Image (cartoon, rainbow, N blue to C red):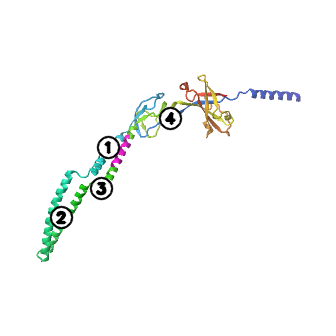
Amino acid sequence: MKNLLKITSSVLLLAGLTGCAEKPAPRLEGKVKRDVIAFAPKVTGRVLKVMVEEGDLVKTGDTLAILDVPEANAKLSQVKGLLKSAEAQRTLAQNGATSNQLKQLRAKKTGLEEQFSFAEKSYQRARAMAADSMISAQSYDEIRAKYLGAKAQLDAVNAELNEAENGVRYETRQAAQGQADQARGALQEVQIALSERYIIATSDMMIETISLHEGELAPAGYPLFNGYIPERVYFRFTLPEHAVAAFKKGDRVQVSMPYLNQTATGKITTVKQLTRYANITAAYPDYQIEEAVYEVKIVPDNLKNSSAWLTNATVIWIENEK
């Protein structure tokens, strides 16, 4: 009986070892990936027109959508008015008084000189009469007040005429120039905002998704279009640490794409640890929870047929090339 038990145990152990030896090693699967790009407006506006459709291949400089920004149009009219006013003030400060203004000031000065001359003579006579008590104090005070008023008016017109003839002060001209520059900068800012109504493609891409449609409000910074850059394709493998030793940066790798029945070669450009194990994308992950997970990025050698490679399609690692 003991011998029978020994024979049975030996057979079972041998069968277990044979089963383990014949168990195929798990294949390493990855995904076809492309660099993703998004386009978002810099200003808030309502989608006026969408110029492309999902799946379209667009070129750099193509218009993707047009926004309606009525607030910017109203601001443009306001800023243009401010600029005209500021430039007029600057011109006035630079050129000074006109010839007609100078004529008016000189004529005003002549009239005030006559008034002052008459008031001065009246005041001299009143002083002499007041000294002999020939006029009342009230009358003397009235004549004196007229004299001082005429003198003040003449001094004022002389100062005004002197400023007009010599030009506006440097500080005043600088202030007027500053106001004009500020208004011009505000105009440029509004014009830039208006140009942002057009969502322009900054690189070649294939449109994957369109987030908003005509008539919807597009907030500033909200991505309206998402897509892939066609020629920037790579293979991405996510591997546990016990399997990543076979992949080193700079190694050449051969992979296959089952759905196309094609093979491709490439070079490993990046091997980096992922921060969360949930980022693994292999169809059949084989790792322990305590293991670190790494991303291996492989850039293909030949992109001739890459347009037929579907994003997120499965690729299988075959071997490292010697």
For marks 1 and 2, give the CA distance.
45 Å
User: How dense is the environment of label 1, judged by Cα within 10 Å: few (below 14), some, or many (20 and up)?
Assistant: some
Q: CA distance from mark 3 to mark 2?
A: 27 Å
- 267 with respect to 54 (left or right): right
Magenta stretch encompasses residue 8: no
Q: Nearer the viewer, mark 1 or mark 3?
A: 3
Q: Earlier in the sequence, mark 1 or mark 3?
A: 1
Which structural element holds mark 2?
helix
Q: Name the residue type under label 3.
A: Arg
**Residue that carries the numbered disc 2 in the rendered image:** 150
Q: Image point 77% across, 27% down: which residue?
A: 18
Image height check: is 304 above or below 211?
above
Q: Label 1 sits on what residue type? A: Lys
At x 52% / y 34%, what residue is drawn? Answer: 36
Q: Which residue is mark 3?
A: 169
Label 4 sits on residue: 37
Using the image, determine if residue 138 lies above or below residue 22.
below
Going by the numbered disc 4, the residue's amino acid type is: Ile
Instruction: Give how far across and how far down residue 292 sits, in percent.
Output: 66, 39
- Between disc 4 and disc 3, the foreground one is 3
Element under disc 1:
helix
Predominant secondary structure, magenta span: helix
Check the image and name the residue furthest to the bottom.
132
Residue at numbered disc 1? 80
Circles 3 and 2, Cβ within 8 Å, touching? The answer is no
Q: Nearer the viewer, mark 3 or mark 2?
A: 3
Closer to the chain start, of discs 3 and 2, is 2
Q: Which residues are magenta?
A: 179-191
- Whichever of callouts 1 and 4 sits on the residue coming sooner in the sequence is 4
Name the secondary structure under disc 3: loop
Can residue 173 be seen here? The reply is: yes
Badge nearest the viewer, 2 or 4: 2
